[in-house]
Image (cartoon, grey):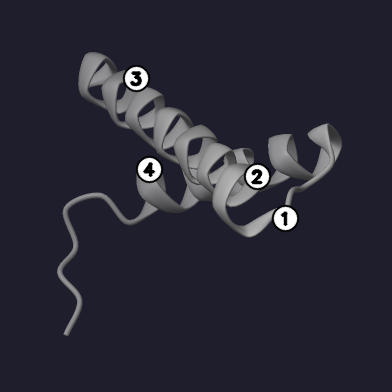
Amino acid sequence: MKAVRSLMLLITYAWELWKQKNARIFERWYLSPRRLIKKIKQEGCTVVCCRGQTFT
């Protein structure tokens, strides 16, 4: 289970960095490094806490 959690977090971090890169290039909008790290941590916690649940 620890490996799955680590993989999920890695994918979440990569996804957030990808979205930030696209925002900088295409929308000329960006977060400060501190805010980006905070957002990545929040998303990571959300992914880990909600793992296996379905949403309707």
Which numbered disc, 1 or 3, marks the residue that appears first in the sequence?
3
> Is label 1 in a helix, a strand or a loop?
loop
Residue 32 image position (x, y, % from top left): 84, 41
Dot 2 and dot 1 residues touching (CB under 8 Å): yes
Q: Are marks 4 and 2 in contact (CB under 8 Å)?
A: no
Gap between marks 1 and 3, in whole Å?
29 Å
What x and y, as percent, mark residue 49? 39, 51
Residue at label 1?
A: 29
| 50 sits to left or right of 44 | left
- Distance between mark 3 and mark 2 Cα atoms: 27 Å
**Could you say whether the residue bearing mark 3 is in a helix, strand or loop?**
helix
Could you tell me the amino acid type at mark 2? Arg
Q: Residues within 10 Å of mark 1 (few under 14, many from 20)?
A: few
Which label's residue is closer to the chain start, 4 or 3? 3
Q: Position of residue 18 (x, y in %)?
A: 46, 36
Residue 24 image position (x, y, % from top left): 65, 44
Q: Quadrant of residue 21?
A: top right
User: On the image, numbered disc 4 is attached to which residue?
Assistant: 48
